[in-house]
Amino acid sequence: MEISKRAIITVLGNDRVGIIYGISGVLAQNNVNILDISQTILQEFFTMVMVVDVSQSLAEFAQLKEQLALKGKEMGLQVNIQHEDIFRYMHRI
Amino acid sequence: MPFNISNEEILETWRMVEVEKLDIRTITMGINILDCRTDDADKTGRAIYDKICLWARDLVKVGEGIERDFGIPIINKRISVTPIAMLVDGFTKEQIIRVGQCLDQAAREVGVNFLGGFTALVHKGYTRGAWELIQAIPETLAATQHVCSSVNVGTTKAGINMDAVYDMGQIIKKTAALTADKDGLGCAKLVVFCNAVNDNPFMAGAFHGPGEPESVLNIGISGPGVVSNVVKNNPDCELGELANRIKNTAFKITRSGELVGRVASSRLGVPFGIVDLSLAPTPAVGDSVAEILEAMGLEQVGTHGTTAALALLNDAVKKGGAMASSYVGGLSGAFIPVSEDAGMIAAAEAGALTLDKLEAMTCVCSVGLDMIAVPGDTPAETLSAIIADEAAIGMINRKTTAVRIIPAPGKKVGDYVEFGGLLGRAPIMPVNPNHSTLFIKRKGRIPAPLQALNN
């Protein structure tokens, strides 16, 4: 079973200057292309959702996940990356 | 393909995992080991060890990879094997204990926390191998860490083997005695079944039954916290509507299990078996089935109305889950292990939840009296009688029932057993003081009920 080349990055926490800059820096370094980006205040959280293409990523998925989490920690945010299939499976028939 | 998942949906998944503790409880790899039988017990043990290590070498690694890729925790990676009783005919009890130790070494080698299949299916009677295996259970569970054992004493089609029911009372007592320094921990790894299923991914009762392929992956989902939140967020809606909302949630939970199963199966090159639709609790706060029932409006689980609430809950979980997975199987019932569910522990402590009520709950959908600690001086015949009652419920209702009971050595009502980790802690619950000895000592076989005659 082929898993999707696309992944979802979720960023949660308090809004501040430089969130997109910080996260997209990590992505650029790893040759991960941003396909879509949106941010909202949802359920009292600042929420940013990015759809990215990880097929050309220079880093393994696990390393990318680690780097993003680390960058998030620096900025006091929770940053996670997941392959999109989990969302498609859960929310679409 | 365009991306059309909304932020709300993404956040919902995030909340399920991060806040409501959604996880995949287990991916369990079933492995056929019938081909490992040789004329020598130690060679057989070695062959079993080698086969498990070969087939399951990547199980933990693949599981961890899937956790990372999809951001959903997989708590346990486990193995089930062919019932050992099927390949130890002619071996002595001591030899079978050594085979059990090989299983333990294999589990340690591949990094799984439990391995099920030290099992005998004796619902109609004993083979020599099954008899010897059952005699070997107490020492094996005392001498090993990871091995789980189960014995099937009845089915709807065969009736109940009351010889085995009698013997299992004695075996449970002996197992407790041999692990007395750990509150009778051995008994937490021993399940007595009626209508045991061949593809159960959950411990301690998992085994790779007859009719299963060479190897297979079975998935156990979880998610009491997610369902509990749905119920809490709908405090006023009528029960039909509540059932509907639980169904929707169960669908989503099960879909995550289905995805994990399919990906794991493809990465390991092993066929996907089933998703087991059971809401498995853990001792962690917020991961409790009791909490769901209480959120429905019961002051404390165990009070009047508990059985009805549980019936509604489990039926809704099954209906949602059945739509979400192509292959549903295993136990697919409610687990209410007393020591592994914070709400159940609290209710048992308060005296709101009794053995009798737990038994009633097994009539509708619970899969048995699970992780129940009783006084250490409970007679073996009383344990047998408890097993007989559960087996009768299973036999008549064409469902799986099980007993995992711990007569904790030296403990009495008011004391606690502490197992730690997933196995949790439990207050000692009182049993009925009246003896059942003469009934149990009759032994023999309870005939298959009319329900069996359906051809």
Image (tube, rainbow, N blue to C red):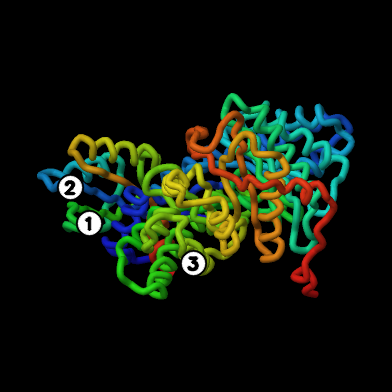
Which amino acid type is marked by label 1? Ile
Secondary structure at numbered mark 1? strand
Neighbourhood count class around disc 2 (C-alpha, 10 Å): few under 14, some 14–19, many 20 upward: some
- Identify the residue shown where x is 74% and y is 63%: B156
Q: Is residue B70 left or right of residue B434?
A: left
**Location of residue B184 with respect to B350 vertically, above or below:** above
- Identify the residue shown where x is 41% and y is 51%: B22
**Location of residue B377 with respect to B261 vertically, above or below:** above
Secondary structure at numbered mark 3? helix
Q: Is residue B409 left or right of residue B151?
A: left
Question: Sequence order check: which comes first, mark 1 or mark 2?
Answer: 2
What is the chain identity of the residue bearing mark 1? A
x, y percent for residue B16: 35, 54
x, y percent for residue B387: 69, 50
Asked if labels 3 and 2 touch by Cβ distance under 8 angstroms, the answer is no
Q: Which residue is mark 2?
A: A20
Of B93 and B252, which appears nearest the observer?
B93
Label drawn at residue B308: 3
- Identify the residue shown where x is 65% and y is 54%: B199
Asked if labels 3 and 1 touch by Cβ distance under 8 angstroms, the answer is no
Q: Nearer the viewer, mark 1 or mark 3?
A: 3
Q: Which residue is mark 1?
A: A37
Do the residues at discs 1 and 3 belong to one chain? Answer: no
x, y percent for residue B273: 62, 56
- Identify the residue shown where x is 85% and y is 52%: B444
Neighbourhood count class around disc 3 (C-alpha, 10 Å): few under 14, some 14–19, many 20 upward: few
x, y percent for residue B296: 38, 63
Of B260 and B15, which appears nearest the observer?
B15
Of A68 and B91, which appears nearest the observer?
B91
Which amino acid type is marked by label 3? Ala
For residue B410, what is the image quadrant? top right
